[in-house]
Image (cartoon, rainbow, N blue to C red):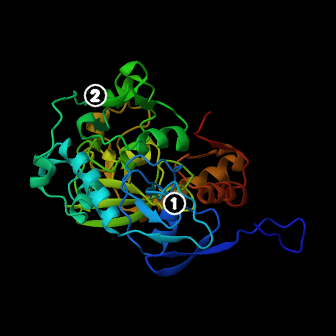
Amino acid sequence: MIKTDDASAEEVSTTITLTIDGREIETRDGATVLEAALASGIIIPTLCHDPDLRPYGACRLCVVEIEGMRGLVPSCTTLAREGMIIQTNTANVKKSRRITMELIVANHPADCLTCAKNQDCRLQHFASYLGVDQEHCDRLRKSTQVLPVDRRHPAFDFDPNKCILCAKCVRACHEVTCAAVIDLSYRGYDAKISTFGDKSWIEANCRSCGDCVDRCPTGALAPKNEMKGDRSVKTVCPYCGVGCSLYLGIRDNQIVNIKGDKKSPVNKGGLCVKGRFGFDFVKHPERLTRPLIRKKDVGRDVKIDRSNYRDFFREATWEEALELVADNLAACKEKEGPDSIGVLSSAKFTNEENYVVQKFARAVIGTNNIDHCARL
């Protein structure tokens, strides 16, 4: 690390130079070998690496040869050093990666065509990349252990038979959401991901944020009723004023999947339970999509039956509805004064929209009677 001339200035990280597969590469001081390689476009297979999580070194697919180091070393947990000479594609590296992948695939269910993560599975992708075929897997002894699938959570399913123990879900739950609901339990052949007391996820105070589901490289954690979309639309979550950015998968004009925007400076790909799983209201048959105006022959003291609201209201255009509201507000202000009007804002507004609401109340209507629907 070096410092600028100003003693109060923040420390600035230096860069180092190393050689990977004969290419001279610059990377930041403190980066791992894997990060340096990936940033330079060099492919190194990995299943347990995640840029948001601490290095773990569980899958052992990212092994490389480094001059001066004995044997193969995991690139995800090895810090890059000045002058390092690294080989990522030697015969020993290829053999190690292939055997490791064969052992993983041999104990993995082969229902790829019906799996929720089909074509979006990192295990499937790297098995193909490493050239793993069925003939080599068949010569290995397969597991006879079949664990029950937990389908009790309303948002996602957990199939421990598809779990490869990369622990990305565990690390996300501990390091990102800080909920610590799940962990690696038992040992050796019996090792698995479970909650405290081996309860279902919904019984273990799971926040249902879905961060574990999003990071799972296989179909072990998969959302319910999710399909692949024909197109993707970038938007902002409407549930609160934080402004989390997300991508909606659209198919037949319906939302079929949701992904957080990892490039967003607000949420960096993370979403809460509402943002990730709470968009079924969009296609609800009772959702109002146009303004309603009370019919003139219906008094305000009449009790409204919500199931037959169309008997009391009629659909209108947005222009007609806004004009009616503006006229009534102006009439009320002129007759009773501005303090006879109160403005109630919404937690689903952005901060900027709430600012406009209070300016409208104070500067246009002339009242300080402003409140907010959120109560903590």
| Amino acid type, callout 1 | Met
Residue situated furthest bottom in the rendering: 23
Quadrant that contains the N terminus: bottom right
Disc 2 packing (10 Å; few <14; some 14–19; many ≥20): few
Quarter occupied by residue 274:
top left
- In the rendered view, tell whether residue 55 sits above or below residue 125: above
Q: What element carries label 1?
A: loop
Location of mark 2 (residue): 152
Location of mark 1 (residue): 69
Viewer-nearest residue: 368 or 174 = 174
Viewer-nearest residue: 261 or 24 = 24
**Labelled disc at residue 39:** none
Q: Which residue is drawn at 48% across and 41% down?
A: 171
| Amino acid type, callout 2 | Arg
Q: Which residue is drawn at 27% across and 45% down?
A: 284
Relative side of 9 to 197, left or right: right
Viewer-nearest residue: 266 or 134 = 134
Viewer-nearest residue: 245 or 113 = 113
Relative side of 166 to 53, left or right: left
Q: Which residue is drawn at 43% across and 22% down?
A: 196
Q: Which mark sits nearer the N-terminus, 2 or 1?
A: 1
